[in-house]
Amino acid sequence: MNTLAVPVAVAADAGVAPRAVRSATVEAPWVRRALIGAALLFLTLFLFVPLVTVFYEAFKKGWDVYLAAILEPDARSAIALTLLAAAISVPANLVFGVSAAWAIAKFDFRGKNVLLTLIDLPFSVSPVIAGLIYVLVFGLQGWFGSWFIDNDLKIIFAVPGIVLATIFVTFPFVARELIPLMQAQGQEQEEAARVLGASGWQMFWRVTLPNVKWALLYGVILCNARAMGEFGAVSVVSGHIRGQTNTMPLHIEIVYNEYQFAAAFAVASLLALLALVTLGLKYFIEQRVKDQRRAVGDRAE
Amino acid sequence: MILSRTLLKRHSVLPGFDLALGFALLYLSLIVLLPLSAAFLKTFTMTWAAFWDAVSSPRVVASYRLTFGASFAAALLNAFFGLIVAWVLVRYEFPFKRLIDALVDLPFALPTAVAGIALTAIYAENGWIGQFLPFKVSFTPLGVFVALVFIGVPFVVRTVQPVLEDVNRELEEAAATLGASRWQTFTKVILPIVLPALLTGFALAFARALGEYGSVIFIAGNMPMISEITPLLIITKLEQYDYAGATAIAVVMLVTSFALLLLINSLQTWARKRQGGV
């Protein structure tokens, strides 16, 4: 708590540099101070304290307990499954994102707006419902349930179900970053490449991809963070079989419910670290994308 | 070939339309549309009376009341503080501003289960914040509210922030020259400009909160009729193999989400028009 109180105090003081004459479009110093204080208090209570808590609780019982918690076999298999689910779902959604963005941004076709709305649909579906619909399709009583049983394929309460649910909840991330940028960039560069004799793939690898690489990376990073952290959807389809169908978030839940708080927070701290790395990369790329957008804007003028 | 002949409005020299759109449509159908339609088709196998029973039993209605009430209250608190945070980040300078700005997105990046156990620990009776509060937060409906505030933080800030950055300062100078106080300038000039964005952020936070599961179940205590949210009830029904009952509730939630999505889309259109006009 003490470590957090310091920046709050510093920040409040810095906002009140004394000024003899106040501009008519600036608030009184006490208003400024109160607003900065209110904003920081709110963010501290709801964001910063929870973040610090994760690391504090994880290391409360020392390094040995921490290491034991993340190295035990169940935790390791949970980490492996989380990495596997992300390793399949992120590339799958990446290929989709690029295809959808290519069609939507570079061509004029009927039904484009409907397609745009449908791509965003998974974001407005509750994760629990995302899991439920796959149970309905692939579960025992589901549409294809008996066919899969006859062929000895397990989807629900097995790894494929976890991957499918993860793909669903991370579906729009790459597409929604690429589409606006590629629309803004227009078709001229690709058309020029074609006129100069480039093949379709040459044009794609040498012109289109370099133009969108930062936005693409941005989408991939957000997609990956969500894929590794998804809880609700995966929880429904997983079946919670220890060492087999538990991802990291599910492992945290089980260990936490067994009152092994230090162990739960230890695994949670790995995901919190991933979140911080994600935010750092996101910030870095945002600056790049801003520069690129500005460059596109200049060219347009 | 079929796609380009029937859908394309005008011919293009660029290649790959059929392949790109074909793959996108196939993938979208298999991953999203087909499974989603399964939920609706499943409810068609129920009689109307059975459907109505499933979605209006007292326990389910209590969960709607909690989910909608807590989501609304959390979105409201986020609208108020989100506007202040956006204002402070755009208008003032203070130490660690960039770091704080980047951390606003934490709820997007931090897995909900991690947030859930952290908030439970903090707001428990012996927790860092809970010990100073005269009332219980963890394991009560108030805990649901706290978790939903956490996950909604970035929505209002990130929708209001860019609009606030674009506000023409000359308008404020004009208001000041005409004798308006700073408060009048805020309520009569600035607030109308950011209002569409503020409402959009509110609606986005509300919609996200309605479906939230991971961060809530740890802190809620999950007592039927008191602190049980609707998504949890869907899971409970599934675990009892009441697939039809679970799906019926899910359809109610889906229809609500789609209605909200339409509302948000029209709010955004309004916001764009308003911004273009100023």
Image: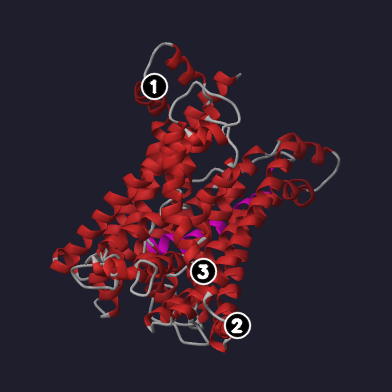
Quadrant of the drawing holding the C terminus of chain B: top right
The quadrant where residue A140 appears? bottom left
Amino acid type shown at disc 3: Leu
- Position of residue B168 in the picture relative to residue B213 (left or right): right
**Residue located beneath label 1 in the image:** A203
- Please tell me whether mark 3 sits on a helix, a strand or a loop: helix
Q: Residue at x 51, y 45 (%)?
A: B94
What chain letter is assigned to the residue under label 1?
Answer: A
Residue B143 vs residue A105, the one in the foreground:
A105
Residue B150 vs residue B42, the one in the foreground:
B42
- Please tell me whether mark 2 sits on a helix, a strand or a loop: helix
The image shows residue B215, relative to residue B199, as above or below, that is below
- Position of residue A258 in the picture relative to residue A39 (left or right): left
Magenta residues (range): A26-51
Instruction: Give the x, y percent position of residue A245.
Output: 24, 67
Judge the density around disc 2: few (<14), some (14-19), many (≥20) Cα neighbours within 10 Å. Answer: some
What chain letter is assigned to the residue under label 3?
Answer: B
**Residue located beneath label 2 in the image:** B52
Residue B41 got which mark?
Answer: 3
The image shows residue A249, relative to residue A301, as above or below, that is below
The image shows residue A35, relative to residue B127, as above or below, that is above
Judge the density around disc 1: few (<14), some (14-19), many (≥20) Cα neighbours within 10 Å. Answer: many
